[in-house]
Image (cartoon, helix red, strand yellow):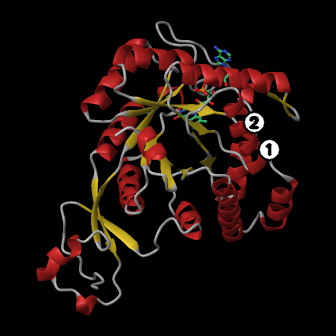
Amino acid sequence: QKIREAVDGEGRTVFSFEFFPPKTEEGVENLFERMDRMVAHNPTFCDITWGAGGSTADLTLEIANRMQNMVCESFLIVVCPSQFDPSSFSSFSSPSHYQLISVETMMHLTCTNMPVEKIDHALDNIKNNGIQNVLALRGDPPHGQDKFVQVEGGFSCALDLVKHIRAKYGDYFGITVAGYPEAHPDMIQEGGATLEAYSNDLAYLKKKVDAGADLIITQLFYDTDIFLKFVSDCRQIGITCPIVPGIMPINNYKGFLRMTGFCKTKITSEITAALDPIKDNEEAVKAYGIHLGTEMCKKILAHGIKTLHLYTLNMEKSALAILMNLGLIEESKVTRSLPWRPPTNVFRA
Ligand code: FAD
C-alpha cells in the first residue's frame, strides 16, 4: 500500500517510526527485535534511512526488504500466567487480543554518489520485494566534503530524482519528499533564513510535489509555531498533499545540540531554560524530552494534523512514551515475531 493513502484516508490520528541502519550485524538483530516491539503498536509505516553518501546502500536495501516482509504477532500482556491455556489459542484471534501485524515500509534514497544505474538498481530491488514507498532526497555531501557534488550520470537535486522515478516507474511508488519548516540549512544564515530564501525554498518544495511527490515529511523542529506557519505557507502556495511533522524526542543533551547545530534548528528560550539546569542528568533530559515531545504533538494534533512521524534514532522508550501520553498506543501491547510460539502468559477475557 502507498503511505499517502493510509495517511489520508483513515481520518484518525496515525504515526510512524524512522530507523537508521546499525553499524554491526548484532546491531541489526537488536534493531529488528526493537522493531518487533514497536510494530506491535501498529504504526502506519516505518522508514529506514540511506546512509550519508550512500554509505549504507546494501544494508538499507536489506533492512527495507526485511522490514516490508516482516510479520509480528501482537497481543495484550499478561497479568496472570496461570490463566493461559494453549489449547484455547483460537480464542485469541479476536483483534482486541491477538493480531498479525505487518509494516508498510518506506526506503530513503539519496542522489549522493548514485549514478542513475545504481538508483534504478535500488528501486528495482525494493519493487521486487513489494515496497511501494520511497523518500526521494538529494542527500548531504559525503563525509569530509562541504558541498553536494552531482556524480557523473546522476542527479543534482531531489526534484530530478522525483521526476525520474515518475518517468521510469509511473505510479508504482508513493513518493515522499523532505520539507524544511525553517528552510534548508544551506539557506539559513545567522538568525534564520531571509524571507526571500524561505520563499524560494517553499517554491522549490512545490516543484517537487508538482513533479509527483505525494507526501512531505519535515525536518526536525522544536518550535511548533514555526511548523504550523510552514504548513499554512505551503497551503497558500497550493501545496495540498499531507505534510507530516518530523518529531525527534530529545534523548540526551549533547546529541540534541549536535543535531540542532547540524540542521540549524531554532531552540526556543523556554527549551534552553528548561535544559540548562538538567543538562548533566541524562534521565532528567530524557524525561523533559518526552514532556516536550508530548506537548508539541498535542498542539500539532489540535491544529488538525493527523499524522506524527517519530525520528526514533533506533530507540523505543521516548517515542513510545510520547505516543502513550497522547493516548495513541496501549502500554500493554507486546509482540513476538513469527514463527509463532505459544505465549506463556496471555491475558484472557
Ligand atoms: P533538495 O530537495 O534537492 O534540495 C535541498 C535544498 O536545496 C532545497 O530546499 C532548496 O533550497 C535547494 N535547491 C535544490 N535544488 C534546487 C532547485 N533546482 N531550485 C531551487 N532550489 C533548489 N540524508 C541522507 O543522507 N539520508 C537520509 O536518509 C536522509 N533522510 C532525510 C529525511 C528527512 C525527512 C529530511 C528532512 C532530511 C533527510 N536527509 C537525509 C537529509 C537531506 O539529505 C539533506 O537535508 C540534503 O541536504 C537535502 O536533501 P533534499 O532532498 O531536501 O534536497
Res 223 seen here: no
- Seen at 85% across and 59% down, the residue is 270
Residue for badge 1: 266
Q: CA distance from mark 2 to mark 1?
A: 8 Å
Query: Could you say where residue 233 lies in the image, as x and y percent from the top left?
Result: 73, 33
Q: Nearer the viewer, residue 112 or 242?
A: 242
Q: Quadrant of ligand 1?
A: top right
Quadrant that contains the C terminus? bottom left
- Can you say whether 226 is above or below 348 in the image? above
| Badge 2 element | loop
Quadrant that contains the N terminus? top left
Drawn side of residue 97 relative to residue 201, left or right: left
Q: Nearer the viewer, residue 40 or 14?
A: 14
Q: Is mark 1 within 8 Å of ligand 1?
A: no
Within the image, what quadrant is residue 71 found in? bottom left
- Mark number displayed over residue 182: 2
Which label sits in the foreground, 2 or 1?
2
- Seen at 33% across and 83% down, the residue is 78
Q: Amino acid at mark 1?
A: Lys
Most distant residue in the top direction: 152
Q: Are marks 2 and 1 in contact (CB under 8 Å)?
A: yes
